[in-house]
Image (cartoon, rainbow, N blue to C red):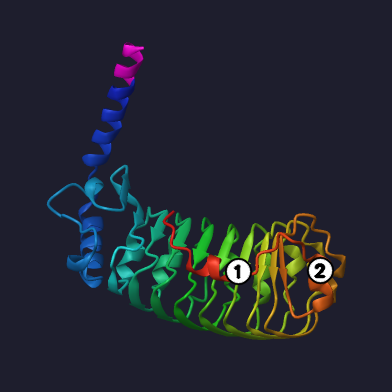
Amino acid sequence: MNKILKITTIILVFFASIVLNAKITKEEKQILKEFYEATNGSEWTHKWNFNKKAGTWHGVVVENNHVVEINLHHNGLEGTIPSSMGNLSHLRVLNLAFNKLTGPIPISLVQLHYLEKLKLEMNSLSGILPSSFKNAKNLRELTLFNNSLEGTIPEGIGEASQLKILNLSSNYFDGELPKGIAALTELESLELFGNKLSGTITADIGNLKNLKELVLSYNRFEGNLPESTANLSQLKLVQLQGNNFGSIRALINLSSKGLATFDSDDEFLNIQFRTNTLSRTRITNAKFEDVED
């Protein structure tokens, strides 16, 4: 047993040594210095010490001399995100949620080929979304809720073909739901609560076969919900209330057997789908959950 413990200890020390001595290129170090200064790094909760190896900096993960993750969730960041962050070409995760960031989202971020997760929720970001996501082939999570973003949701969002989570709730997006949404066949969660989206939904939502959460509540949608919506057999959460839908009766034939939450302005469907286990507070919990991941 002692021999096994010694071997385990050696392995742990070895990997710890790799992390603590991890170096990055001069170019990447300069980019992170610019980011640190642009976001008032001297006032961060957990600051970076540029006299130490990058592997020791709070929230920074280094692999093969490149920065692959930056997790600065709830760390007192204040300022703007410099566009040079898009030059961290090996970055897979960028989590800057629950800070005080302002200004636009740099277009360069969604051009990062290896980026899998972009979490910028609960800030004060403004401006519009990039029009093209054609380079975001590995992006699986895009969470931007509770900011001040505006404009339309671009058709190009459909180019991020691996997206599983798209949460744009509690912003000022307007216009119609882009037809490009239907191309996101891996999507499991679509949350657009509390924007100014309007018009009739012409996107083929029924194409989102893996969708588990559909949250369109408190927008200005009109017309009838697409008939294909009834094909979403994986749905567990549906929230459509606070719109001007002419009819959502397409859902009367919904084949989902795991539905846990259903909220709409159609009382007939509410009664049909409601059980004693439904949660009426799901929206609040989803939008303000302060959990680092």
- What count of labels does the image hold? 2
| Callout 2–callout 1 Cβ contact below 8 Å | no
Residue depth check, mark 2 versus mark 1: number of the one nearer the observer = 1
Q: Which residue is mark 1?
A: 281
Q: Residue furthest right?
A: 253
Q: Is residue 28 left or right of residue 151?
A: left
The residue nearer to you, when weighing 73 against 62, is 73
Tell whether 100 sits left or right of 225. left
Is residue 286 within the magenta segment?
no
How far across and how far down the image is residue 201, in percent?
73, 80
Give the camera-side residue of 153 and 43: 43
As helix, strand or loop, the secondary structure at mark 1 comes to: loop
Main SS of the magenta part reads helix
Residue receiving disc 2: 228
Q: Type of residue at label 2?
A: Ser
- Seen at 51% across and 80% down, the residue is 171
Q: Which numbered marker is on residue 171?
A: none
Q: Amino acid at mark 1?
A: Thr
Residue ranking furthest to the left = 51
